[in-house]
Amino acid sequence: MVILLLSTSAAAASEISVNLAGVGGRTCAFWLSSPNHRSEGAVWIYGFWSGLNYVAAASEQNQSKATSDALISAVERTCRSHPSRVLATVAWSAYIDLNKE
C-alpha cells in the first residue's frame, strides 16, 4: 500500500485510509500545542520521512533530499495555516512537494 501511496498525489492521499501509529494521527493543532508535542511530532515526522525514503529507494523512485530543517519548516507552515489537518497528511504533502524541488 505504501508503494501505491508514493505514486499517489498529495490531494488524493487525504482520501486514503491509513492505520497510523503515534502522534502522526493527531491534528496539527495538537502538534503545535506544546513544546513536548512539537518534539514528539518532530521525531514522528523524521521517522515517517525516513520510511517514505526507504520505500522510495526500494521501489526505485526518487528519495527526498530535503534537510531536517526544511522538512519540519514545510510541515509547520502548512500546519499553522490548517491546524485541523492530520499531521501525517501534512507530512505526506510536504514530502511530495519537497521531492519536486
Image (spheres, rainbow, N blue to C red):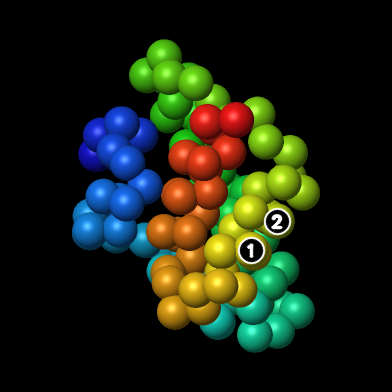
> Which amino acid, by three-letter code, is at mark 1?
Arg
| Distance Cα–Cα, label 2 vs label 1 | 6 Å
81, 65: nearer the viewer: 81
Q: Quadrant of the N terminus?
A: top left
> Which amino acid, by three-letter code, is at mark 2?
Ser
Can residue 87 be spotted in the picture?
yes
* Rendering coords of residue 30 (x, y %): 55, 82
Q: Quadrant of the C terminus?
A: top right
- Give me the disc on residue 73: 2
Q: Does residue 13 appear left or right of residue 74 in this picture? A: left
Tell me the SS state at disc 2.
Answer: helix
Q: Reply above or below: 95 against 80.
A: above
Can residue 18 be spotted in the picture?
no
* Rendering coords of residue 11 (x, y %): 32, 51
**Label 2 Cα neighbours within 10 Å, binned few <14 / some 14-19 / many ≥20:** few
* Rendering coords of residue 49 (x, y %): 55, 43
Please tell me which residue is depicted at 47% across the width and 40% down the height of the picture: 96
Please tell me which residue is depicted at 51% across the width and 78% down the height of the picture: 83
Please tell me which residue is depicted at 54% across the width and 25% down the height of the picture: 63
Q: Reply above or below: 86 against 98.
A: below
Q: Does residue 6 appear left or right of residue 94 in this picture? A: left
- Image quadrant where residue 7 sits: top left
The reply to whether dot 2 and dot 1 touch (C-beta < 8 Å) is: yes
Name the residue beneath numbered marker 1: 77
**Label 1 Cα neighbours within 10 Å, binned few <14 / some 14-19 / many ≥20:** few
* Rendering coords of residue 79 (x, y %): 56, 69
